[in-house]
Image (cartoon, rainbow, N blue to C red):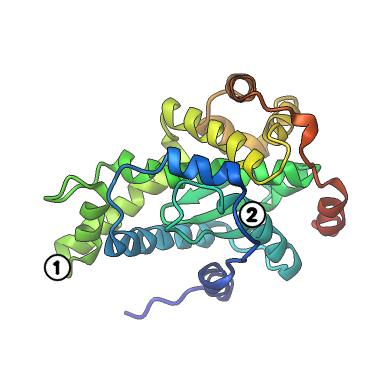
Amino acid sequence: MIRLFPISLLVALTLMAGCSASTGKPSQSGAQFRHRASVTDEVVASDIEEEVRFGREVAARIIGRYGLYENDKIMKYVNLVGAVVSQNTNRPELNFHFAVLNTEEINAYAAPGGFVLVTRGALLKMRDEAELAGVLAHEIGHIVEKHVVKELNIKGSDESSAAGLATLIGGSSQSARTAFAQSVDKALDVLFKDGYSRADETQADRDAVLFSAFAGYDPAGLIHLFERLNTAKGKNTEVLDKTHPSYETRISWMKGTLSREGLDTGSYKAGVNRFSSTIKNLK
């Protein structure tokens, strides 16, 4: 049977496959972090390719659930901000792609291989570009640390979880295809129902602070957003509230990172005017 996808889904996958923007060289601090915190798994081209394939399927399922917010100006803007942040990560072998989901729910999602999705509702709650950068940086953190891949514990004969993933996806048998589909379902359970582990969320929040700073954004951007969301809990934050630690806890984690790293938030940009002029027509 031929599977037909909604036009919006096809558009999203096309954009996400080819909408990566070049924004110049990484900052010196970013390059140092990338060297210092480089992933210990051996990077093999075929493993990365299969990780991306798996993540694209997860992203497609998420987009199929919410639909794509089809606004070229906002899509380009989110991709540009994301590109600036992602160039300073410890997974330089990945190309990151970003899209906006057409839902009033306040959340963002990360799929393995470099796919980041932020909701229209989340954008509406933001006040500046630094807050957007912080949200994208948090999701990028989940991807660069392979949290979903490790959570699923997908392994083959090789010790590398990525190699195990390549074996699983590359299999042509019915059992391999079934296992692949089940793994995608489990990944979606992590994102929508179970949530990441506390350790994974701590790490992603820490990365959000550092990645934002490396890109020149106020590293307290995500803190500012969480402080407002903490007083505005409701129907649109249900998924976020259910799958994440409390805002108070996460704010404490990030403030601790700011202190340990000696980051002066007043010396970074917030991008209020550019954010406002781009997002002003968002409904």
The disc, 2 or 1, on the residue closer to the chain's N-terminal end is 2
Q: Is residue 37 left or right of residue 49?
A: right
Which amino acid lies under the numbered mark 1 shown in the image of this protein?
Answer: Ser
- Residue on which the image places disc 1: 173
Q: Quickly name the residue at label 2.
A: 84
Q: Is residue 264 left or right of residue 203?
A: right
Is residue 106 at least partly visible in the picture?
no
Q: Amino acid at mark 2?
A: Val
Q: Residue at x 44, y 46 (%)?
A: 144
Of the pair 3 and 143, the residue shown nearer to us? 143
Residue 145 x, y percent position in the rendering: 41, 42
**In this rendering, is residue 133 above or below 77?**
above
What residue sits 57% from the left and 57% below the top? Answer: 66
Q: Does dot 1 land on a helix, a strand or a loop? A: loop
Left or right: residue 147 versus residue 227 is left
Q: Position of residue 222 (x, y in %)?
A: 67, 35
* Residue 255 in the image: above or below residue 155: above
* Image spot of residue 120 (x, y percent): 69, 52
